[in-house]
Amino acid sequence: MADAEGFTVKLARSSKEIFVPRGGSILFALMDAGISVPFSCGGGICGSCEQEVLSGIPEHRDFVLSDEERESNTSMMICCSGSKTEVIELNI
């Protein structure tokens, strides 16, 4: 499981690592680090922030993905979802 203090997002394309504090948003942690990613609603209902997961296990909190898509752990909505693992790697 992710650390009680948060988890790390590894960005595959740039090799950057961003820490997301417990209760924080991947989307806003990336934005705070100056990384621009697409988004719209910020609440997990539109699907604009969907990103490909390369490794790690997402903690899905969105209303977009089907049960089958969630079980595959190949994508996640970064505005509202977290990580069940200490590190999650995204194709960003």
Image (cartoon, grey):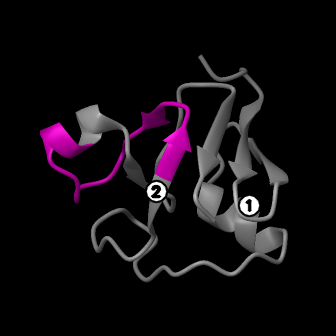
Q: Residues in magenta?
A: 53-69
In magenta stretch: residue 12: no
- Which residue is at a point 15% across and 48% down the rendered structure image? 66
Amino acid type indicated by mark 2: Glu
Instruction: Name which of mark 2 and mark 1 comes first in the sequence.
Output: 1
User: Percent from the top left, x then y, of residue 76?
Assistant: 41, 52
Q: Quadrant of residue 64?
A: bottom left
What residue lies at 28% left-to-right and 67% top-to-bottom?
A: 45
Look at mark 2 in the image and give the residue it sits on.
Answer: 52
Q: Residue furthest top?
A: 1
Residue named by callout 1: 29
Q: Name the amino acid, label 1.
A: Ala
Q: Position of residue 90 (x, y in %)?
A: 59, 53
| Residue 18 placement (x, y as % from top left) | 81, 52
Q: Secondary structure at mark 2?
A: strand
- Give whichever of 68, 81 is nearer the camera: 68
